Amino acid sequence: MHPDALADRVINIVVTSDGRFALPRDAAIVAADPIFEANRPKGTLQIAIALGPILTNPVEFHYRDLILAVRRMNHLVERRAGLLNWAGHRVKDMSFKCDSAPGCSLTIHRAAGDRTYRPDAAGIIILKLDEKLEFEDSRVTASRRFAEIEADL
């Protein structure tokens, strides 16, 4: 589709009750660089970007896969994030949000012994990134799927 074909096209984006939305993945839309219009009063619309890893199996993966995803996120911030790049933001740790069911945990299986992390009162496990674990390529397991996995800048 040629970008000019989008000139009169309106694309409605569904926003969920918690404020989340997904932009359509369409090269023609990106090439057209369209204007966004919102039904909110001027100055009240806020947009936040959450970066998260795409893991083949988010319940069992290798630490190296997590680090690879972090490198990709850092590359994105360096190349595309404007002010964030200028401020030197980089992913420092990962945030694993548990659902409300009890028993949520994340375990890193190392040669020196397993290390299990449990959520804080808010249901979040913060995993500080550790280069040593990348070289060991430790296996990481979760007790179940997390509600969210996000990068903390």
Image (cartoon, rainbow, N blue to C red):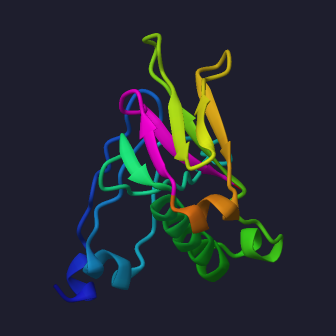
Of 151 and 15, the residue lying toward us: 151
The relative height of residue 13 versus residue 30 in the rendered view (above or below) is above
Task: Name the residue rendered at 58%, 72% in the picture.
Answer: 71
Measured as percent of width and height from the top left, residue 137 is found at 51, 62
Name the magenta segment's main secondary structure. strand
- Is residue 83 visible in the rendered structure shown here? yes
Residue 18 appears left or right of 50:
left
Residue 75 appears left or right of 130:
left
The relative height of residue 73 versus residue 114 in the rendered view (above or below) is below
Measured as percent of width and height from the top left, residue 117 is found at 61, 30
- Is residue 41 visible in the rendered structure shown here? no
Region rendered in magenta: 138-152
Q: Is residue 3 magenta?
A: no
**Quick one: which residue is furthest to the right in this view?**
87
Task: Name the residue rendered at 26%, 61% in the picture.
Answer: 10
Q: Quadrant of residue 33?
A: bottom left
Of 95 and 107, the residue lying toward us: 107
The relative height of residue 70 versus residue 114 in the rendered view (above or below) is below
